Image: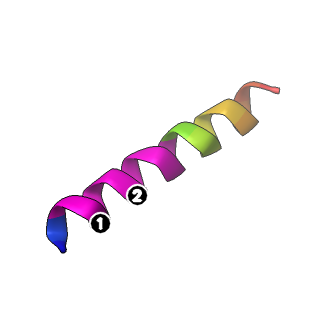
Amino acid sequence: DKAKRQEEEAILDLYLSALGEV
């Protein structure tokens, strides 16, 4: 499912951004 894929990538992007701020 393409929509689910994009959602997972968005979550992963937020996760990496959060890690980068630490």
Percent position of residue 21, x then y: 73, 25
Q: Secondary structure at mark 1?
A: helix
Q: Residue at x 62, y 44 (%)?
A: 16
Residue at screen point 47% across, 46% down = 11
Question: Which residue is under mark 1?
Answer: 5
State left or right for residue 3 relative to residue 9.
Answer: left
Mark 2 and mark 1 residues within 8 Å of each other at the beta carbon? yes
The part of the image, by quadrant, that contains residue 17 is: top right
Q: Quadrant of the C terminus?
A: top right
Q: Amino acid at mark 2?
A: Glu
Dot label at residue 21: none
**Residue on which the image places disc 2:** 8
Left or right: 19 as drawn, with respect to 16: right
The Cα–Cα distance between marks 2 and 1, rounded to whole angstroms, is: 5 Å
Count the marks: how many?
2
Q: Residue furthest right?
A: 22
Residue 9: in magenta span: yes
Magenta highlight range: 3-13
Farthest-out residue, top:
21
Q: Main secondary structure of the magenta part?
A: helix
Asked whether 21 or 11 is in front, the reply is: 11
Image quarter where the N terminus lies is bottom left
